[in-house]
Image (cartoon, coloured by chain):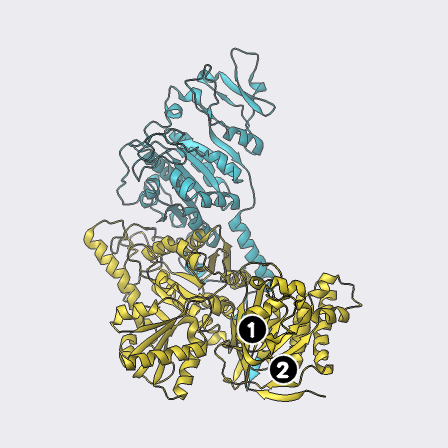
Amino acid sequence: MTINTKIQEHINKNRNENGNLPEYSGKDFSSDQDVRWCPGCGDYTILKQVQNIMPDIGVPKKDIVFISGIGCAARFPYYMDTFGMHSIHGRAPAIATGLKVTRPELSVWIITGDGDSLSIGANHFVQLLRRNVDVNLLLFNNKIYGLTKGQYSPTSHEGTVTKSTPYGSVDHPFNPVALSLGADGTFVARTMDRDPRHLQAMLKRANDHKGTSMLEIYQNCIVFNDGAFELFTDKKSRPKEAIYLEDGEPLIFGEENTKGIRLDGLKPEIVSLEESNYTKDDLWIHDEKDATKAHLLSRFFDEPDPRAETPQHMPRPFGVLFAVDRPRYDEGVNLQIEETFRRKGEGDLDELLRGPETWEIK
Amino acid sequence: MAAKKQVKEEVTIRFAGDSGDGMQLTGSLFTNTAALQGNDLRTLPEFPAEIRAPAGTVPGVSSFQLHFGSKEILTPGDICDVLVAMNAAALKANLDLLRKGGIVIANTSGFDKKNLNLAKYENNEVSPLEDDTLSEYSLIEIDVTKITREALSDSELTFKEIDRCKNMFVLGFLYWMYERPLDSTIRYLKDKFSGSPEIAEANVTVLKAGYNYGETTEVVSARYTVKEASLEPGTYRNITGNESTVLGLAAAARKSRLPLFFGSYPITPASDVLHGMSKLKNFGITTFQAEDEIAAVSSAIGAAFGGSLGVTSSSGPGIALKGEAIGLAVMLELPLVILNIQRAGPSTGMPTKTEQADLMQAMHGRNGESPIAIVAPKTPADCFDTVFEACRIALEHMIPVMYLSDGFLANGSEPWKFPQSGDLKDIQVEFEPARDENAAKFLPYVRDERFVRHWSIPGTEGLEHRVGGLEKEDETGDVSYDPDNHQKMVKMRQAKRDKIADYIPLQQVDSGNEEGEIVVVGWGSTYGSLSTAVHELREEGMDVSHIHIRYLAPFPKNLGDLLKGFKQVLVPEINNGQLVSLIRDRFMIAARGINKIKGRPFGVEELKQEIRKAASAKVNS
């Protein structure tokens, strides 16, 4: 029980008579605006997959809100036929928090990029995760600044040569999934634009999770950073370089699934399932609820070093690294309000105005 | 020999001591008792920004000034009649604020050699209580520390706890001097220390000891009565500006029947508004202590998008950080209330000192053409009405409104004849209703006769639409780079802001004639000093009027005409000349500023002098 406000009254008055969810198709979520990303941009397929899963999340269009910051990805809400806000650089998590706390029944999605949420908005990004506000954050990572035409980003690797770093960047990059785990994120996952089926599956998982869902999406910027994730997206190298995580399943990858990862104490090592005595039973079994293992997985972040004599490195994990339940901020705030109502009843404005002590002038 | 009794029309007491001496509490409790006795009053708390500056030093002095009387009191008093000095530093820092012949009540144990050294008295051999420093004042010396310890000799409390009660001794003594009852303070102490009755008991014992000390000692020759003021009949309470701001917001939430979302980040002197709001959960108020100022305002915008009354609060440095987001709210045309409890700047400035130097920031402190509405309260109690107006304008005109209070109003207090909730007008809010599938395309930027777009909130069928910071096409709200559209929309947002002038009261002359020789024009917290100064100058026969502006953007429609009825326009401000620039710019009037920028409010005498000087300068020129 809380106050019957005009919002409540408005929602009740405008309620759909039969209460059934309309039967949507992906097209119903496409707005009348022309999509204006560069031809071949990874954003197109992400948009398409988001529109495709929307009919399945069980939420009427009127209750879905997309909020973005600034950047190429941030144009996303304009193309969704839902409620949307294209806000200011880096602040979408804060705006979404205000909205979700006051309207917890809404399905709130944050669209952001590596610059938006890891540079200018990095503070809000980690605060959102630690609070565990029940929203879905899609982090389009293309390791470059696209909209400002090609400067290095906080996920660009050291030495990246761009317009603003003609001698190569000397910044150490963020590892977004490790950062999210460090901020006590309750749902941390990674996917890529070039694997639509996996992308769809991850979007659904993100939607189903109660709490902040952080889904990093490797997204190709065809103009300024083409092929940044080719190792993982190219059909030839993908089996060697990418490992798909499945809860309860062993960590297996490689062409013909011939390699596995086992744990020697806390040290992961790659083993051959063909040329050694190790079998599937010896491998690391993925457990989405295991925070320690999630941290180890998040550190699978190295890339092949051509200068090394034996270029041994870990494959990049895709899938849900970590997913646990933890009380959510929006829920906690509203429980506290409801509890106060139960205890004290609706506030008496006249009593409040009168205050503790008064006097009479006659 | 019993003390003589005298009747006084008004008294100003300044409580001064070390930051740890509890002077703010002592002052507040005396204030409440004076208020309950029916006096009119104003207060001025002044404290260091440091939580505990080095004990015993001048920078560590905390003061609380109270001006109360049986006549109308509008300022905390230029100069005090009584100075309580708990130590040598307190005397040193405040003696020039005591009128000649005034009373010093000194705690002698705060004047030992160590204290004289800490206060940097040049001669640490002789206490200023003993040389001729106080020859022009009347001195009451009490060894407060010693007597407090004696009064609690049976107590189980530690020495430290006992010494913390000594402010209650001073309070009790002053209650005796000014013939005040102890009951309200005793009630307060019992309530505050309900968890540790022995501390409550000790404080009450010492309070009574102070009172009885007055009865039995012969150090004082006179007791004073200040009769109740002839305020307008009604029921009153005492209130600070920040408290009444909280109440005004709660009232606006109730009268708009909206949930109120308050996103804030702690900053002096605005934090008390956050503290106050966070207690009011059962009024449908949600508070969010954000990670920074930007998140605070952004969260309020998110809440406003969802249909709540979104409010954010801060002081100047925080408002600077919020600028970009306020611009977003201008573009989104969503209601947003931004509280700026101003303090002395620039940069971190003087956090605990007052100033009204953020008017230009409110007016122009965003990129692009970004007009918002601005209102400013004039007294602590007026904060209630003004913040209520801020909410009304924001909601009824779908626009960000900046509310410019300041440290002086925030912490100062006065008696308030509080309204009944039934007397407050409803704030009109209507959300855009749902549309069925066959309806024409929904146009989120269609406007009504006030140029206001409708509030179309998520959860409403058929209203799915996108807003954002990119320029909007007229009516559709789609992104547009069309040059003519941009000009049209810039002009439209300005026209919408200016149109508010049709929905606010006309400017009144506060005192004096509607035309004449001189008008003194003020805004915000200078009201009390300006009003008192103008009244007194008029009594001297000067042709001077007073106009005080609550609505700073847009100005009331008749303001220009009113000002043109005077030969001279003087604009006193606690800044380097901001309203005066706006007036000159807007009305082409040769207005002149009177500017004080010392982190303190205007004194009445200094204002009178400045007004006289300005008046004669004009005559001579």
Residue B95 image label: 1
Is residue B310 visible in this depiction of the protein? no
What x and y, as percent, mark residue B509? 35, 81
Structural crowding at the residue carrying mark 1, measured as other residues with C-alpha within 10 Å and reported as few (<14), some (14–19) or many (≥20): many
What x and y, as percent, mark residue B532? 44, 81
Is residue B53 visible in this depiction of the protein? yes
Q: CA distance from mark 2 to mark 1?
A: 21 Å
Q: How many marks?
A: 2
Q: For the residue labelled by badge 1, is the local secondary structure a helix, a strand or a loop?
A: helix
Which quadrant is home to the C terminus of chain B?
bottom left
Which quadrant is home to the N terminus of chain B?
bottom right
Determine which quarter of the picture holds residue B356.
bottom left
The residue positioned farthest toward the right in the image shown: B154
Look at discs 2 and 1 and give the one toward the viewer.
Answer: 1
Chain of the residue where label 2 is placed in the rendered structure: B
Determine which quarter of the picture holds residue B430.
bottom left
Residue B249 image label: none
Colour for chain B in the figure: yellow
Structural crowding at the residue carrying mark 2, measured as other residues with C-alpha within 10 Å and reported as few (<14), some (14–19) or many (≥20): many
Q: Would you name the residue on which mark 2 appears? A: B178
